[in-house]
Image (cartoon, rainbow, N blue to C red):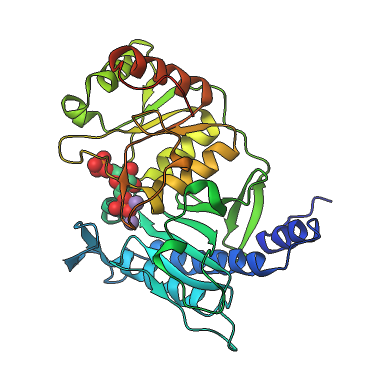
Amino acid sequence: MYRIETLDEFIIKRQKSYSTATGELTGLLRDIGLAAKIVNREVNKAGLINILGKFQKENASGEQVAKLDIYANDRLIDFLKTSGECAGIASEELEDFVVFPPRNEQRGKYVVVIDPLDGSSNIDVNVSVGTIFGIYRRVSPEDQDITLKDFLQPGLDLVAAGYVIYGTSTILVYSTGDGVNGFTLDPSIGEFCLSHRDIKIPEEGPYYSVNQGYYLKFDLEMRRYIDYCSDLNLRLRYIGTMVADIHRILFQGGVFLYPNTRKYPKGKLRLLYECNPLAYIVEQAGGKALNVKLERILEMQPEELHQRSSVIMGSPKMIDEMAEFVQRYAPNIPSEVG
Ligand code: AHG
Ligand code: MN
Ligand code: MN
């Protein structure tokens, strides 16, 4: 008989296969899974209770914040704070990072970066939203409080990353650097169950995903590449929730672009909370993730918590092709492709 494998079972099994693993990362991932279930419950009943709508405030990046953003932010912090393994978090919703007090005089070994609710503009209209997370081993001494440096690590130093998509079903996808696996929440038993083992992104695919409304605000090389996608009759899909757009591309192949625009000269998406964790997943699945200068996202050295970046990620063949356009139409960009 087919036996389901829950997220917790999977995480523990994985831990056992590494003789050096101490279990702390395992505990942290389980806590994130638990928090995701709580957020999922609220997302699902968002239309029923008076939780929809906006707070009269802006988040650290100056955008309007929907109520569920705050709810998701607070729940994730609650769970991570009491986990014991996490020394602090940085969130898209908070100006500064949060230091968690030691538990039993022990400080956690890890710090976590989160975009608690990705795609907030879609909440009120019942379209998929997500949660994104990344986990780093702290670099500061463990007997002291964490510092900004613990968060300003390049994506290459992530020890784990993932996302949850609250869609037609709720799916948690994560990697600890040895492939990517996906778990679908079975609401009847309240467990994430292994549903997508060892996810591999197709070499190329039928989709391109970009806010084409900004076409005239993109640089020439991006416009030429988008024209090329259109000439190829690729199908344009753009949800406006990065998690959901990447999720499609991860399974069906394609390319996701958020280049710099006049409004966002460095790109809109946040390096720590959005670009790095999703670049990590895409690369772990065999894809590529670059910025418009053709630098590998995971090699970028963050300078500040809320740093933004341009991003192009997806199927490896398509990213190589995109790089050719950039080299042809923006010849001052080096030819080394990450
Ligand atoms: P968030 O809701 O966390 O602020 O993120 C929204 C992001 C991302 O998910 C999406 O791809 C992008 O913003 C959409 O931006 P545009 O509306 O400018 O296309
Ligand atoms: Mn986001
Ligand atoms: Mn968000």
Which residue shows up at 41% across the image and 39% down it? Answer: 245
Seen in the image, is 142 located left or right of residue 247? right
Which residue shows up at 40% across the image and 20% down it? Answer: 322
Seen in the image, is 129 located left or right of residue 195? left
Front residue (pair 292, 222): 292
Which residue shows up at 80% across the image and 56% down it? Answer: 17
Vertical placement of residue 238 versus 79, above or below: above
On the image, which quarter does residue 47 sit in?
bottom left
Front residue (pair 144, 129): 144
Vertical placement of residue 118 versus 313, above or below: below
Question: In the rendering, at what x and y percent does residue 323 appear?
Answer: 41, 20
Which residue shows up at 70% across the image and 68% down it? Answer: 23
Question: In the rendering, at what x and y percent does residue 96 appear?
Answer: 31, 68
Front residue (pair 278, 252): 278
On the image, which quarter does residue 61 sit in?
bottom left
Asked whether residue 38 is in view, the answer is yes
